[in-house]
Amino acid sequence: MRRRRMLVLCPHPQGVAAGQRLKYEQYMDDWRAAGWDITVSSYMDDAMWRVVYEKGHARAKAAGVARGHLRRMRDLARVARYDLVYVFMWVTPVGTSVFERLVRRFARHVIYDVEDNVLVGQRLDKGDNPNPLAKLIKGPGKARYLIRTADHVIASSPFLAETCRGMNARGAATYISSSVDTDRFEPTGRYDNDHPIVIGWTGTFSTKPFLDLLADVFRRLAERVPFTLKVIGNFDYDLSGVPLEVVRWSAANEVADLQTFDIGVYPLPIDDWVTGKSGLKAIQYMAFALPCVATEVGTTPLLIRDGENGLLVRSDDEWVDALERLVRDADLRRRLGTAARADAVACYSLHAVAGQYRAVIDSVKGE
């Protein structure tokens, strides 16, 4: 049997964006072993990635957009030679849907992988958007077209998958959760109270407004119990009245940094956009055997069983009470964290999820 050819079209360079790293990128070796030769074409190159989410750098960003469009023009010339085109989020992040339409016209088969509820779009305040390009990247028009026309849609939540199934011309949409390498994301097994307790959060500028939802919670908590808030991200952060450590995310230090957490927090607004989120932060915390406190909305009740493998809350008072319990009670952290780790391995590890991707690819593969 001949080896088949797949072209992956994605926004970001490989290995840097969580939406790609902790979704399909982890499985490309598995696809290669199943008989696929894979070519990856990222819209952004490394030079653009370094500045795209920073304020300013207008000239460098414009040059990056020009290079990205030239790269996509080259891709259009070769799309028809591949058995399958795998599109993550968009073909191009800016402009009209013309590139998406041309890819669909010339490609034999298309799988569209979409995360978050881009049909609604995330509304960020001006201060939380580092540049207009970042706002354009969230536009829903391209996603609607790809959802309608793809041979199969992979969605980041069961709610989004249901919506996509109704929109897709073939009714073909599958929910595949974000997942983690539980052989690499290993817990430390530290549950004592003989060290300063660290409450941790990891994310990017686009999810910073969710962390901001807990500002008053952390201030109130600091009046009750000692703790350090550790923020891992790609932005500066300050919170008066709260002991704080801010760390820049890096691939090299990702595991070691997350292993310093004692408790993970996953705050979310209660709105339609959140129903498309996969719960990635919660899954990361679970893999490290951390008790996670999360807003009870969207997919979080599907991941977290309140009082069994984490805690679910809705109000500020519930946030403060839940975090205080965990800071004070090492045995509770151990019980919830141990159950969370078991669920992460069973349901959200590479071994658990790999077959779901293969099943979708096999359903649309070209011969």
Image (cartoon, rainbow, N blue to C red):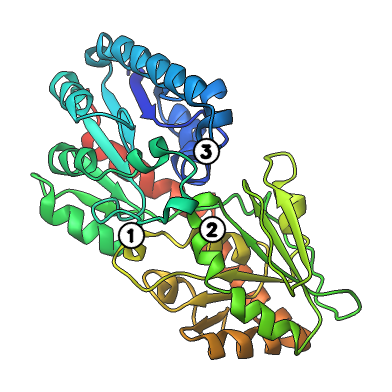
The residue under label 3 is: 53
**Disc 1 to disc 3, C-alpha distance:** 22 Å
Q: Which of marks 1 and 3 is in front?
A: 3
Q: Measuring from the top left, give residue 68's x and y in whole percent.
A: 39, 19
Residue displayed at 28% across by 10% down: 78
Q: Residues within 10 Å of mark 1 (few under 14, many from 20)?
A: many
The residue under label 1 is: 276
Marks 1 and 2: in contact by CB < 8 Å? no
Secondary structure beneath disc 1? helix
Question: Vertical placement of 116 versus 82: above or below?
Answer: below
Secondary structure beneath disc 3? loop
Q: How crowded is mark 3: few (under 14 residues within 10 Å), some or many (20 or more)?
A: many
Of pointers 1 and 3, the one earlier in the residue sequence: 3
Q: Measuring from the top left, give residue 227's x and y in whole percent.
A: 79, 76
Q: Which amino acid does label 2 sit on?
A: Lys
Total numbered badges shown on the rendered structure: 3
Marks 3 and 2: in contact by CB < 8 Å? no
Q: What residue type is labelled 1?
A: Gly
